[in-house]
Amino acid sequence: MALHSCRTVGDECLEKWELVGSGGFGRVFKARHKDLRIDVAIKILHDGVSAMILRDEAKFMDLASCEFVVRLIGSYHGCQPGKRPCTQQGIVMEFMEGGSVQSLQKDLGGPPPWPLVLRLAHQVAQGMNFIHREKLMHQDLKPSNVLLNYHLNAKIADFGLTRVSASASKSNMETPGQIGGSYKYMPPEAFKSASYEPVRSFDVYSYGILLWSIVTGKEPYQTANYERVAWKIPAGDRPLCEKFEQKGEAGLDELVSLMNRCWDGSPDKRPTFLQCLDVTEKLLSMHRIRIHDAVGQVLKRRMSPTSGTSNTNRAFNVPLQTAEQFENDTLDHCRITEARKSFTQVCDSTKTMSIKDKAKFVDDNRAKLIQDVSEVMAITDELGDMVHRETLSEIGRKDTISQQKMRVLFGRTLRSGGKKVKAAFYDALKAHHPDLVESLGGYL
């Protein structure tokens, strides 16, 4: 990777390798850089994936280098532990120990304090403004791609779908190609035509949806599959803004107004990121004095031994009730009995279904799952970066039936993704096809 700011990092510089994530392109490791005395993140491609993808990502990270983009440290060339004597290539980046906006939402069980909401909104806009000034588009702006350092400052990551663009009009695209990104963050025009070529207003729309997610602490359209989103978004549907927890906070109305401008159905009416900064800078200045306390509050909650307990129930499909609620319940005896039975099944599954068991379930029932799973896009969306963007594009085609979608998912993702990917598929399957899981002998 002949990049002007990218040096090669070899095995002699690295120690204490630890797998921290896996996606459609490859795996991400945390390692200790012995010479720099810092932790770094190393992205290494899965076997068989073209090294060109990694070279392009490194090139765009290099071009977009600024305070609000994850820093590229170098290229990796060596043999990671457990892979010797196989030589592998990768990219080395700064390690963001604060996780992502997505993991922050999960840890808090909701939105961060209002001053931190505004700082995240402003820092993402700063990063995206720089990226657009460099004639680039990100194309995959979402909570999992906004990473946080220890003090919860935001930096934009994952340039795997980035491309060059010279303007906000289709006719001036320099590098036409396949649409990328996560469908819940894609603009309406991307669903209307197979020949659509993304432009910079694509990122602005994604930013509007991201703002809503940061303010609410939620994923947009949580229960909607690809087909429903592709139908409703071009028709004008957007996330609801009526029930924000921050009612009464100074600046909320202005931020909601910015959201609505960003996700306007007409690309030409969306603001530039420089115009977004006019709003976010003003709002952040109103609450800057409260930032320190807000960050301290969040760090204290994340470090607490009981942090995350508020999220436990959200992972289950069955509502959990207290004994008092059961006593006051007006449901008949049969429904209460069924609720208790379901609760027991959930508890049993958390105790007995290991990753190995879930993977075996998926392998053993391959033919039946291909035949009967209908919510393929919803499940694929939950798998996130575990699914390669080309696989996602093929699965999302409207003229492809569910069985064909499942064959593609099995052939390109589940077969080669390993036990953890299959276990993640099993968990998503429970949420969308509980009856099927139960009929095949799985636990709910």
Image (spheres, rainbow, N blue to C red):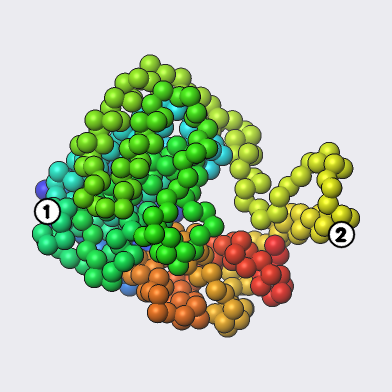
Q: CA distance from mark 2 to mark 1?
A: 63 Å
In this rendering, does residue 419 appear at all?
A: no
Give the residue at mark 2.
334
Amino acid type for the residue under numbered disc 1: Ala
Amino acid type for the residue under numbered disc 2: Cys
Q: Quadrant of residue 125?
A: top left
Identify the residue at horizontal 33%, vertical 37% (top origin).
258
Q: Nearer the viewer, residue 85 or 387?
A: 387
Establish if 234 lies above or below 315.
below
Give the residue at mark 1.
166
Q: Quadrant of residue 428?
A: bottom right
Q: Are marks 2 and 1 in contact (CB under 8 Å)?
A: no
Q: Earlier in the sequence, mark 2 or mark 1?
A: 1
Position of residue 13 measured from the top left corner of the image (x, y, whole percent): 29, 46
Identify the residue at horizontal 28%, vertical 27% (top origin).
281
Return the residue found at the far front: 235
Identify the residue at horizontal 64%, vertical 61% (top origin).
354
